[in-house]
Image (cartoon, rainbow, N blue to C red):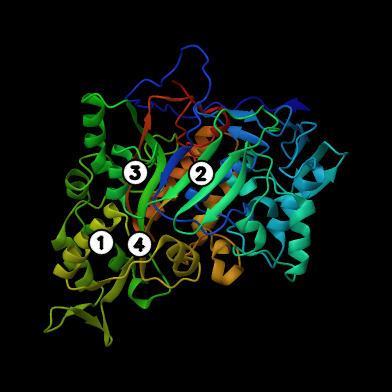
Amino acid sequence: MKTVKRLMVLLVLSLLVVAVTACGGQAQKEAPKPLVWGMLSDIETLNPILSESSNETDIMNGIFSTLIKVNDKLEFVPDLLEELPTLSPDGLTYTFKLRKGVTFHDGVELTSEDVKFLMDMKLAEGNAVPSRDHFSKVDKFEIIDKYNFKITLKELDVTWLEAWAYSENMIPPKHILEKEFKENGNSLTKGGNFSRKPIGTGPYQFVEWKPNEYIMLKKYDKYFKGAPKLDTIVFKVIPDTNALLAQFKNGEIDVYDKAQPNQYKELVAMKDKGAAIEVFKYPAFIYLHADFNLRNPIFQDKRVRQALNYAFPKQQFIETVLDGIGTPADSNIPPISWAYNPNVRKYDYNPDKAKQLLDEAGWVVGPDGVRTKDGMKLAFKLSTNSGNKIREKFQEIAKQEWEAIGAKVEIQNYEAATLFGDILENIKFDIIIFAWVSGFDPDSKTLWHSKQIPDETGDGQNYVGYKNPRVDELLEAGLKETDIEKRKKIYWELQEILAEEVPYMFIYYYNNITAVPTSLVNFKVNPTQANNTWNIWEWEWKK
């Protein structure tokens, strides 16, 4: 057996920190005031088995723990484990050793049984989990004793360990959830009791969730890494990005995470004028995309999807709407990744090319200016989460540009909980606009593999219904290849295919923007899907 060493990033990531993190000073008694974190939309669940929302991750980082973490240096470090797991020479068997004495918030000790229960719940047919892919790769789960267990994979997967660092694999309490699972007919729901009143092993205990207003957490004094320094953390729902900025300015919220790109200059100006804040801007593993429902006959011809790409002015959008804070996207892998392919097909703004493609595809302009084919109009809806001004501006521009080439576009937006919990999950969209937050490994099997189409297989996040046998082959090969250069070739080809077939319109890669008060100590940005609350137990106020 050999010890799995800390995973250093396989890329050169330069974080542009626009203010030095506050530090130093003598230890002082913590201020009694709660920390208030601004959040654009409410959540659906606080059950990590069912969650797939970044906002939920922010909160659950306080309530739950993971076996390992990805820190701000993009290294794997132990969390619930005493040390990083050991790996067998064939790369298939991981041996884990839990910390002793870790307790859930009700005082019950966490054991190997709780980890095994997580896997059982992820694989249970009655649970509407975002993806079963991680645990479907497990051949055998062996409990050695109360604190030690082994997991053997069916086949090699070089990306498998990373998922243990994220919210999808936070460890829930078997002694509580098993009863709810059985009483609910062998299923868990986002509206279930645990989803609304969770109990974990994290640094903060759940106190209250007032829908569309706030979620409140209180420190857990028996947290295994020591009692947190902050007494109370409140995640406040403010469903408008302009209102979020206003409340940060007047001190009604302390942390403005995921600020809009066009707000960056204003935040920096606040600091320059003497405001006691820090502003961080750094490249992230996030991209905005507009997804085509490929079940819709309109979008089944790739020429239509290509035409809509050519007819949208990405660069102008970034310069005017985002104040230049963003990079045009041509694939799902951002430029900060070692696997990014800079040579994929680009869709520079070209309305004439868009019209040509639609002509070739048989869409004829009618007397009302709307194209038709076989009695069907080129008409569809654009949907996103209401209150997100950037995405709403994208819709306005897209509607104007796409109607200029012969489409009929309707904008229909929803509250975030409805958009993601109903419209997306139940495939009720024509084109849906949102962002994916990924890990630092380029694997994206759950998004593109034909066995990850949820309405066909009950699993995965291939909501668009994309199918391509070669893409399936590449996604599977990328999980087994250990040679970094060979893996790079695999993901380069994958990006080339996706850029050609555009099941998504890739819009832009994010630069994350976060603003915090200088009095908040130990706030460390994290560009992965671990999110910026990854080390929430270390935060404290400085007087």
**Label 4 or label 2, whichever comes before in sequence order:** 2
In the image, residue 342 sits, relative to residue 229, either above or below, namely below
Compared across the picture, whether 522 is left or right of 141 comes to left
Residue toward you, 5 or 223: 223
Residue toward you, 72 or 42: 42
Q: CA distance from mark 4 to mark 2?
A: 21 Å
Q: CA distance from mark 2 to mark 3?
A: 21 Å
Q: Are marks 1 and 2 in contact (CB under 8 Å)?
A: no
**Disc 2 or disc 3, which is closer to the eye?**
2
**Disc 4 or disc 3, which is closer to the eye?**
4
Q: CA distance from mark 4 to mark 3?
A: 17 Å
Q: Which mark is residue 58?
A: 2
Q: CA distance from mark 1 to mark 4?
A: 9 Å
Q: Which mark is residue 384?
A: 4
Where is residue 236? Give x, y as percent: 44, 48
Where is residue 248? Give x, y as percent: 33, 39
Query: In which quadrant of the rendered view does residue 281 lie?
Result: top left
Mark 3 = which residue? 509
In the image, residue 444 sits, relative to residue 432, either above or below, namely above
Mark 1 = which residue? 395
Q: CA distance from mark 1 to mark 2?
A: 27 Å
* Secondary structure at numbered mark 3: strand
**Label 4 or label 3, whichever comes before in sequence order:** 4
Identified at 46% across, 13% down, the residue is 24
Query: In which quadrant of the rendered view does residue 99 lie?
Result: top right
Identified at 23% across, 82% down, the residue is 372
**Label 2 or label 3, whichever comes before in sequence order:** 2
The amino acid at mark 2 is Asp
Compared across the picture, whether 235 is left or right of 142 comes to left
Compared across the picture, whether 301 is left or right of 403 comes to right
